[in-house]
Image (cartoon, rainbow, N blue to C red):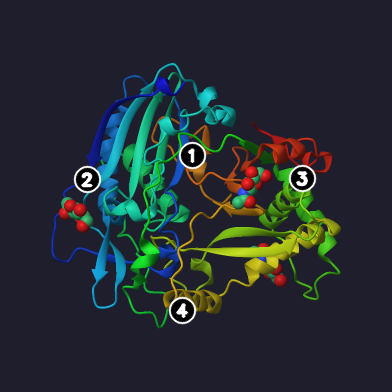
């Protein structure tokens, strides 16, 4: 089935009228960025309805992309690694030098929108990778690979836009803001609209000298030949929580919380209630011993928690991982409200001081993790607040959003808004034996709709 995708052309799109000058911007990387050096690019896809056959979407997208890259110039740069000979360390920065981004045009005339919507097909070896650029590429490879790349595949009855971005140049907030601008340029046929200059993040960590020095021994990474598909016993499912089931879970969690916490104002958010339901249900169906330690890592936007706060929606990567920890036994002896409260406490504990301490400690002994997704833990990323379905290139709103093949592992969870107002879609990867039990768990299913 992977043979169904045929590459028609592959080019580099550069920012429009880019002038190289000595004043070009250098973006130094923070401990929060360097932490992701060995993490695969974030891959996502938007699936669109079929455009009018008269529209030349490829030339339209390329010219809009070129204009958008002039505004979002860090995406068109490259990672630079420098060697500090005095102390055998290396440093990294992003050189916004207008190198451009990779753009692939492909065609899959025998593949329909329905084929790509079903994650079961994504498990067919090679199939899913064929729709995405930068498979298996890790952040440190941004020295030669583009920091973001796109693949536009024309399907039998729709268009599939797959992309990948380096974790160190932009996070989800920044990528969706880039997409919004790209669609606006595309719709205004040539960019008559004026866009304000991109707000970059300022230095937000006190007492850290840039560039950060990382021991060479920590940065000897071998290029792994990426497998053509995720591990065979890993399976994907998409669950939808309707706005009604979200309210029910939220109410249940908040009712149960009364009595656990002295803080009378404790409010469990909808997101925390839904994630608590996922975490508890997955743990329950994982056949763990009661004393086994389980984690839930939440990727959080640190912009809102810094003091002083940075400019709203400033461009860049500003993600911290907040980890809630308990044991399987303790979790199952308690209900939804207790689990939600653990998440709420973890979220609450993420403060400006905590971020600064993390950064200070990291700089002293830099450690770059190899793989974020591990057994007995969930990694939750993306957000139901991202305006996914507001991205219209002029041929209709997206039909769906899908994660790409990268960073595959048990417990990887991406949350998006659902197509219906107020709903959430939870894209889940789990070992098949856990998923099978989960799909037979009445308590879990009571609150979710199996989308695929
Ligand atoms: C940009 O910088 C990268 C990394 O130093 C280099 O490989 C590339 O050739 C440069 N591109 C341009 C257009 O200067
Ligand atoms: C967690 O609890 C605090 C109060 O203790 C509440 O104000 C807040 O809304 C909750 N956090 C989130 C992110 O919902
Ligand atoms: C994780 O769990 C899977 C399935 O239960 C098992 O095959 C694998 O060996 C485990 N990996 C580690 C590192 O424990």
Relative image position of residue 380 (x, y in whole percent): 59, 53
Relative image position of residue 201 (x, y in whole percent): 38, 67
**CA gap, disc 4 to disc 3?**
39 Å
Relative image position of residue 303 (x, y in whole percent): 48, 67
**Image-quarter location of ligand 2:** bottom right
Disc marking residue 14:
2
Q: Is mark 2 within 8 Å of ligand 1?
A: yes
What residue is shown with label 1? 405
**CA gap, disc 3 to disc 2?**
49 Å
Q: Residue at x 37, y 62 (%)?
A: 219
**CA gap, disc 4 to disc 2?**
37 Å
Relative image position of residue 198 (x, y in whole percent): 32, 60
The residue closer to the viewer here, 328 or 195, is 328
Disc marking residue 285:
3
The residue closer to the viewer here, 230 or 59, is 230
Mark 2 surroundings: few (<14), some (14-19) or many (≥20) residues within 10 A: many
Badge 4 element:
helix
What residue is shown with label 4? 360
Residue 311 position by quadrant: bottom left
Q: Is mark 3 within 8 Å of ligand 3?
A: no
Classify residue 442 as left or right of residue 404.
right
Q: Residue at x 67, y 36 (%)?
A: 432
Q: Are marks 1 and 2 in contact (CB under 8 Å)?
A: no
- Camera-near label (4 vs 2) is 4
* Of callouts 4 and 3, the N-terminal one: 3
* Of callouts 4 and 2, the N-terminal one: 2
* Of callouts 1 and 2, the N-terminal one: 2
Q: How many marks?
A: 4
* Of callouts 3 and 2, the N-terminal one: 2
**CA gap, disc 1 to disc 4?**
34 Å
157 is higher (above) or lower (below) than 139: above
């Amino acid at each position: 089935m992977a043979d169904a995708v045929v590459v028609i052309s592959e080019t580099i799109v550069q920012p429009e009228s880019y002038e190289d000058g000595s004043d070009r911007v250098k973006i130094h990387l923070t401990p929060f960025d360097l932490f992701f050096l060995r993490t695969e690019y974030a891959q996502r896809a938007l699936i669109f309805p079929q455009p009018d056959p008269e529209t030349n979407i490829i030339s339209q997208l390329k010219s809009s992309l070129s204009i958008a890259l002039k505004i979002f110039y860090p995406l068109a740069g490259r990672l630079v690694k420098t060697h500090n000979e005095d102390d055998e360390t290396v440093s990294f920065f992003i050189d916004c030098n207008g190198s451009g981004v990779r753009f692939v045009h492909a065609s899959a005339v025998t593949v329909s929108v329905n084929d790509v919507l079903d994650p079961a097909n994504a498990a067919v070896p090679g199939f899913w990778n064929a729709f995405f650029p930068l498979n298996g590429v890790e952040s440190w490879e941004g020295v030669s690979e583009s920091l973001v790349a796109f693949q536009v595949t024309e399907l039998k009855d729709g268009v599939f836009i797959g992309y990948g971005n380096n974790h160190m140049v932009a996070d989800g907030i920044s990528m969706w803001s880039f997409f919004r601008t790209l669609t606006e340029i595309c719709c205004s046929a040539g960019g008559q609209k004026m866009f304000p200059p991109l707000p970059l993040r300022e230095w937000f960590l006190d007492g850290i000298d840039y560039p950060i020095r990382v021991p060479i021994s920590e940065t000897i990474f071998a290029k792994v030949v990426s497998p053509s598909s995720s591990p065979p016993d890993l399976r994907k499912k998409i669950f939808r929580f309707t706005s009604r089931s979200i309210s029910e879970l939220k109410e249940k969690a908040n009712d149960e919380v009364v009595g656990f916490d002295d803080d009378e104002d404790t409010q469990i958010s909808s997101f925390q209630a839904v994630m608590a339901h996922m975490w508890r249900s997955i743990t329950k169906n994982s056949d763990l011993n009661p004393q086994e330690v389980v984690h839930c890592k939440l990727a959080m936007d640190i912009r809102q928690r810094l003091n002083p706060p940075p400019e709203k929606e400033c461009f860049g990567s500003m993600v911290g991982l907040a980890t809630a920890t308990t044991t399987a036994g303790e979790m199952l002896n308690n209900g939804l409200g207790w689990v939600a409260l653990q998440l709420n406490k973890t979220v609450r504990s993420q403060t400006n001081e905590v971020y600064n301490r993390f950064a200070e400690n990291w700089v002293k002994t830099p450690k770059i993790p190899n793989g974020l997704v591990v057994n007995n833990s969930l990694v939750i990323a993306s957000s139901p607040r991202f305006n996914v379905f507001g991205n219209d290139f002029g041929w209709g709103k997206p039909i769906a959003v899908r994660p790409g093949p990268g960073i595959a592992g048990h417990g990887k969870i991406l949350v998006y808004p659902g197509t219906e107002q107020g709903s959430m879609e939870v894209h889940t990867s789990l070992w098949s034996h856990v998923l099978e039990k989960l799909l037979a768990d009445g308590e879990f299913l009571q609150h979710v709709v199996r989308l695929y």
